[in-house]
Image: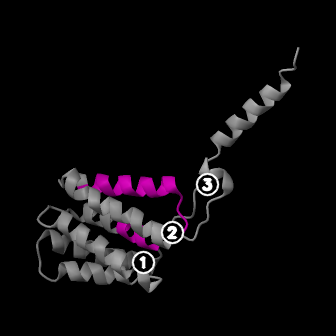
Amino acid sequence: MQSPIPYVLILVAGVSISACRQADGLVPTPSAEAQSEIGDISRDLQSIAAREAQASADLADDLRKYAEPTSLEPAIDELSRRTASAVAGSVLTGDTAQQLANNLWVAVVAREMSKSQIESLQDDLMSVLMSAGIEEGRAQPVAAEVEEIQRLVTTRTRRWYEFF
């Protein structure tokens, strides 16, 4: 009769490996200067909602400040375009615009977020947009672009056990 110990060890190893997940990375906290810039982004969003002509370009300019490397600029421009398209004509309260601005800022500044953190950011972004009365179909492209930006800017490498 064969000992069950090897089978138990295999089972324990399999459960241990499958329980591993990607550790969360650092989510940036805005400094006083960044808070001011997030306020500018918030005002851009409210201007876009009011359909002011220059507001979309202002949003792109304010987010482009964080385009490092500069090859990120097209993705940030696309995020700005998608956001402007979703927000135009909606009613954004000051708090909603501030939350949305903060989410956009995190999306372009964060460099070490895990996959679960990116998904959480996308969910938060969707929730804020939908609370402003924006349909899911118009909010989804904005959230999708957040994932693309994070794919381009992340400096965090995945560990071998995070692929399981």
- Is residue 113 a member of the stretch shown in magenta? yes
Look at the image and give the residue range highlighted in magenta.
Answer: 102-129
Give the tally of numbered discs.
3
For label 1, the SS is helix
For label 3, the SS is loop
Most foreground residue, 142 or 3: 3
Q: Earlier in the sequence, mark 1 or mark 3?
A: 3
Please say if the residues under marks 3 and 2 sit with CB atoms less than 8 Å apart: no
Most foreground residue, 156 or 160: 160
Which residue is denoted by mark 2 in the rendering?
28
Q: What number is the disc on residue 34?
A: 1
Find residue 44 and report its horizontal and vertical position in percent.
23, 76
Most foreground residue, 42 or 12: 12
Q: Main secondary structure of the magenta part?
A: helix
For label 2, the SS is loop
Q: Estimate how packed mark 3 is, as few (under 14), some (14 to 19) or many (20 or more) residues with alpha carbons within 10 Å.
A: some
- Is residue 9 a member of the stretch shown in magenta? no
Report the amino acid beneath label 2.
Pro
Q: Earlier in the sequence, mark 1 or mark 2?
A: 2
Tell me which residue sits at (36%, 68%) in the image.
104
Which residue is denoted by mark 3 in the rendering?
23
Please say if the residues under marks 1 and 2 sit with CB atoms less than 8 Å apart: yes
Tell me which residue sits at (73%, 30%) in the image.
11
